[in-house]
Image (cartoon, rainbow, N blue to C red):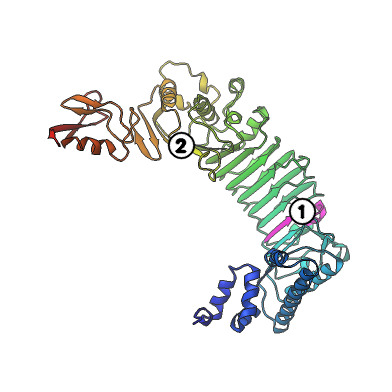
Amino acid sequence: MDRISELPEPILQHILSFLPFKQVFQCAILAKRWKHVWSTFPILRFDHTYFNSLSKIARGRDVWLKRGDLYSFVEQNLESRRKQRLLVKNFTLSDRLGRQKSASRVDRWLSFALESNVEELNLDFERFASVCYCLPQSVLLSKSLRLLSLHRCKFDTSSTGGLINMSSLRKVCLVEVHMDNQFLQSLVVGCPALEDMNLKWCYGLKGIELLCHHGLMAVGIEENRDLERVELEAPNLCSVHIVQTSCEINLNLVEVKLDAPKLCRFDHYTRSVISLSSLNALNLSVATYGMISRDDPWNVKKIEFLSKLSNSKLLSLSLQSAENAIMPKRLRKTVSSPTYNVKHLHLILSSPMSFTRYAIGELVDSLLWISPLLDSLTIEAGSIYKPDDYDKISFKLSYEKPVYKGENSSCCKFLPFPCWRHCLKTVEIDNRRGSADKEILSNYFFENAKTLENFQFLVGGKKIIDDGTFGTPEYWTFEGVPLKKSAYIPDCKMIKHLKSLYYLDLLNLENQNNPMKPVISLAMFGRSD
């Protein structure tokens, strides 16, 4: 008995909203109940899933015949909705345009959707289609649209003199769309409710100027080949994401100006250095700086760019390798630490790194120069999708009030306050795989921080004692005589082994060499055999 079909229609429509178009289409054909649900379903997604399945079971003319059946079904459905004045909340079309006739068909479908007060419109056409679809002017005058996403389209605003009026539009995403500065300004002016704008792989746009836009909250700018400058002035802007990393385009972006007092997140990934000439972002929480080029070393311009991010609470650096993260010592002697106010630093290395090498000490030293009074430092290397190559190490640091004792303070001569070397009190290190060299890190911190009182090393959250055991005693003793100086017993395997030889009673915890590191003392009552 089919109990699912007996569910209320809104629930059935909610179920359909999670299915690809192919399966929705199949449901509508196989059952009358589902056909009626589909006929009033406000979300219409016509994507590649159905067409791709056709190519596996048919070829040549048969594919076009099946496509024709599908197109007829879609058109009849849209016409029926228009006559019934049913709302279309979401209309998504992802297909190829093989001929001009196809473009005319899309025009009719969009006309139906607009008459049904569509709220979300997504158009995505294949990159190598023989016809480049020209968006009807009626779309740019829609009062119902709240979201507009266009991939590989072109605009024709000549008929209305470039007028754009989408008073309800909240989010726009343009991908591989040709536009100029004048069109972008018309778009911004004609969308007063705009909150989120994304421009990806667009061309023809020399500059982006968004001034005094009070509604704008998020801006994404990625791989726009002709872009030279960006200027954003928006009092409610919360997030800015800028990416210029592709090898396929000329990198012309040279200047960015941001006046956004409420900006919380700023991400910038690049192959070349840009000038962040202005950054008014007092509430910056997270800042990400990604340097994609492996062979481009640190220089004064990069350090100056980092210094503009000094007010962020969390700074994330995304680099190719550990070598790219190590700051040359000649620069450390001539310039100040760029992000001395940052309390949390996160380094992401795309290449795997062995933390056992000597470079871990040099890497930590460089990061603590970049941000010299950190509360936490995290280093991730490799991809989490490749567990054999991925590793992670984190540092938690705490401080006491700095006290100078006559030592050379040249390490912080450019800083407004003493660096970590004069006030570090405790260090807790947690290494995911246990591959980091504990001795190197221990020596580094004790040699450089004279005020250090406590050093702890964890592996996967488990405490490591000096002998390499996971939360286990340093010396196993019997009547004060060590039974085994080094034991790896995360699950007490050694205790089980000893119990198989002796009747044991765990009496107390003691350690003659170091009271801070307790040792289990064992008493032997007799052999088990």
Residue under the image location 78 percent in, 73 percent down? 65
Residue 467 image-quadrant placement: top left
Residues drawn in magenta = 171-185
Decide if residue 303 is on the left or right side of residue 443. Answer: right
Residue 298 image-quadrant placement: top right
Marks 1 and 2 close (CB-CB < 8 Å) = no
Mark 2, secondary structure of its residue:
strand
Task: Give the camera-side residue of 141 and 359.
Answer: 359
For the C terminus, the quadrant is: top left
Q: Amino acid at mark 2?
A: Ser
The residue labelled by disc 2 is 394
Residue 474 magenta: no
Residue 177 magenta: yes
261 to 352, vertically: above or below: below
The residue labelled by disc 1 is 176
Q: Is residue 182 visible?
A: yes
Task: Give the camera-side residue of 233 and 468.
Answer: 468
Whole-percent x, y for residue 181 in the image: 81, 51
